[in-house]
Amino acid sequence: MLDALIWIATGIATSVWNLGAALARPHLWLDWSDGAALMRFIYYGGSSEVFFVALTAFLAYTAVGLWRREVLWSAVRGLEGLANAVGRAVAWAGLLLIVQQIVVVFSQRVFAASELGLGIGTTFSADVSWWSEGLKLYNAAIVTLCCAWTFVQKGHVRVDLLYSPASFRAKRLVDMAGAVLLMMPMAVLVWMYAWYFMWRHLVTPKVSASDTLELMMRKAPILRWNVETVGFSPNGFNGYFLFKLLLVIFAGMVLLQAVAVFYRALLEYLEGPEAEDRYLDRDMGADGDTAPAASGGTAQ
């Protein structure tokens, strides 16, 4: 336990220096024409150093926000607004999925077409199976990019026995604990493994979460881009690296949403019931009312 506390304290203490060093010398990790710089970017993107930079920023911002609560409300509005904007835009992928599926079915069954083209002037053409398998991407985008939006809209369902009858401030304590002890660790864990999982399908030689910086720098001279283009069938969809990218974005958005949940719960705890759902941007139903929460339990 003591070793863990020392590790955390050391990480927080050195995070300011690490951030300053990275900002002072951006060419060392942003000049992707240099293999060493790209390797540094890959390594630090899923490293404990970046984790402690984010943790220190979170703690510092929270401390300032406790002094000036409008700072925390600004973060809540900004993070929830981001989740709403992304979710509402990506939700249209459901319509595109339906339209593309209809076109694929008609092309195969009615017109017996082997290829489909899309575009004005310059046309992109691919085998029908490519378009058919590509439907998975729409579904993946909806699942990963609309998760935080659904959370803001209180559309995730949970069945509870203790939360509903609890007092207002007890519920806020549960929300804060859930954000810090469940949402944030899960999002960080997914990010750290999804980050390297994504890069394993973008560059060669392969990188791993267990690689040290020294090992990755030894790989830098032979580093080259090798974007995954292998599909499940010879003419099928070959952009599966996009699924890995979506997983990383999903982890990042869930982490940001966890911060928003914590700040909102903290502010509502401090300011009382009159602050409940303040600035909450809920979607409107067809009758002009806010969309109903999901059934089957208390929506969160």
Image (spheres, grey):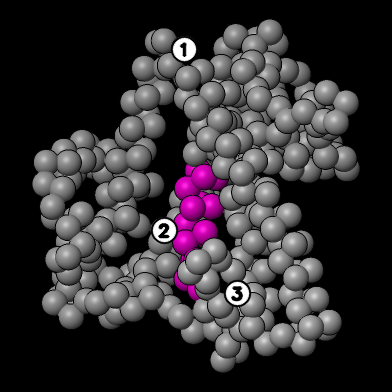
Q: Name the residue under label 2.
A: 192
Q: Nearer the viewer, residue 287 or 39?
A: 287
Residue denoted by label 1: 70
Hey, what amino acid is under mark 1?
Glu
Image coordinates for residue 64, horizontal then vertical, percent: 36, 17
Q: Nearer the viewer, residue 124 or 94?
A: 124
Query: Left or right: where does residue 108 sit relative to residue 221?
Result: right
Quadrant showing the C terminus: top right
Residue 23's disc is none
The crowding category of the residue bearing disc 1, from other C-alpha atoms within 10 Å (few below 14, some 14 to 19, many at least 20), is few
Closer to the N terminus: mark 3 or mark 1? 1
Tell me the SS state at disc 2: helix
Q: Quote the CA–CA distance across marks 2 and 3.
A: 38 Å
Residue 142 locus on image (x, y percent): 65, 54
Amino acid type of the residue tagged 3 in the rendering: Gly
* Residue located at (60% from left, 24% from top): 265
Residue identifier under label 3: 117
